[in-house]
Image (cartoon, rainbow, N blue to C red):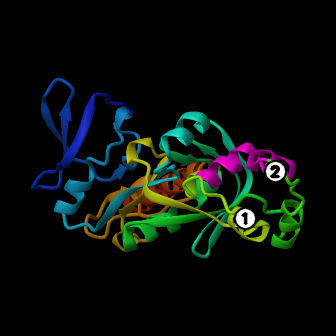
Amino acid sequence: MKIETGHRWVGWSDTGGNRFETSDGAAIEAVADATVFALGGASWPRVGSDGGWVSPFRNAGIHVSELAAANCGIVVGWSDVLARKFAGEPIKNARFTVGDMTSRGDAMITALGLEGGPIYALGPALRSELAATGQATLLVDLHPDLDHASLVARLAKRRPKASISSWLHSAGVSPVAVALARDVTSNHLPGDPAVLAGLLKALPIPITAMAPIERAISTAGGIAVTEVDEDFMLTRRPGVFVAGEMLDWEAPTGGYLLQACLSTGVAAASGVLTWLGVAPTN
C-alpha cells in the first residue's frame, strides 16, 4: 500500500479516471478498479474538509443535497449588555423546545448566540423552521422541575419594597435567567407573578440563523441515499463507493457521529470486496 499526500481530488476524467491536483500544481490521473470516497462534509475547511467535491459529483449527475451546518450553535441578536456580561455563562438545567422537538440540559451563552448539546440536538428542527420562514423561536423553560403553579407560589412571596433583582433572587431565579428575561422583554419584566412565571417557563428567544458551517461540528446534507445501493456504491458510477459525512444523514455529535462514519466506511469496504469478487477476511 502506498499513501500519497498533497493530492486534491478534482473530479473524473472523460474516461472515468480520478483526476488530482498536487500541491506543486501538477495534474495527474489515476485509474482504479474500485474507489472509496470519504471526503467529509464542509465543517472543517481549515483542514481540507470544505465540500469541494460537491460540484464534480453534481456535474456527474449525482444528486447532492445542500450541505448545511449540523451540531452547531445558533445566532441570537443579544443586546450588547447581555453579550458583554454573560458570554461564557451557562444556562443550567433548562428545557429547550422548537416546535414539537424538545431537549434538556445545559447551554452556553456566547457573543454570537447559544451553544451546547441541547442546542445541537434541536438543529434539524431549527434549520427547518429557518428555511421555511426565515426565522425561528426557541422556547426555554428555565425551571423545568417546577410546574407553573409552584413557580407562581415562589414568585408571589415578594416583599413590598424588594427590587426586581432581589425579588427574583429570593424566588430562586438565577442571574442568567433574569438577564435572559430582561433581554427578550427589552427590560420590561412583568410584575404579575403568574405572567412572569409563564415567561420563565417558556422564554421565547428569537433565532436569526444557524452558526456558520465552518464553526459547526459536522455537516448535514450530502449525497442522497437513493444514489447508492446496499453496498454504498454509486448506482451511476459502478465501482465508486462513498462513506461518512458525504452521505445525506446526520447524527448527534460525539460517539454516534463517529460510529456512523466508521460503520459506513466498513460497509463501503465490504462493498468493494464484493465488487471485486474478493472473499472478505476476518
- Residue 177 relative to residue 58: left or right: right
Report the label total.
2
Q: Earlier in the sequence, mark 1 or mark 2?
A: 2
Identify which residue, 174 or 58, lies in the foreground.
174
* Amino acid found under the numbered disc labelled 2: Trp
Please give the name of the residue rendered at 83% of the width and 49% of the height, measured from the top-left corner. 161
- Residue 242 relative to residue 19: left or right: right
Asked whether the viewer can see residue 256, the reply is no
Please give the name of the residue rendered at 48% of the width and 59% of the height, measured from the top-left corner. 207
Tag 1 residue: 196
Identify which residue, 196 or 70, lies in the foreground.
196
Percent coordinates x, y for residue 136 in the rendering: 47, 66
Identify which residue, 32 or 6, lies in the foreground.
6
- Residue 83 relative to residue 128: left or right: right
* Outermost residue toward the left in this view: 14
Q: In which quarter of the image is residue 99?
A: bottom right
Percent coordinates x, y for residue 41 in the rendering: 39, 50
Mark 1 closeness class: few <14, some 14–19, many ≥20 residues within 10 Å: some
- Span shown in magenta: 163-182
Percent coordinates x, y for residue 69 in the rendering: 43, 53
Element type at mark 2: helix
* Amino acid found under the numbered disc labelled 1: Leu
- Magenta highlight: main SS: helix
Tag 2 residue: 167
* Outermost residue toward the front in this view: 161
Please give the name of the residue rendered at 54% of the width and 34% of the height, measured from the top-left corner. 84
Asked whether the viewer can see residue 138, the reply is yes
Let me know if residue 97 is in the magenta part.
no
Mark 1 to mark 2 CA distance (whole Å): 12 Å
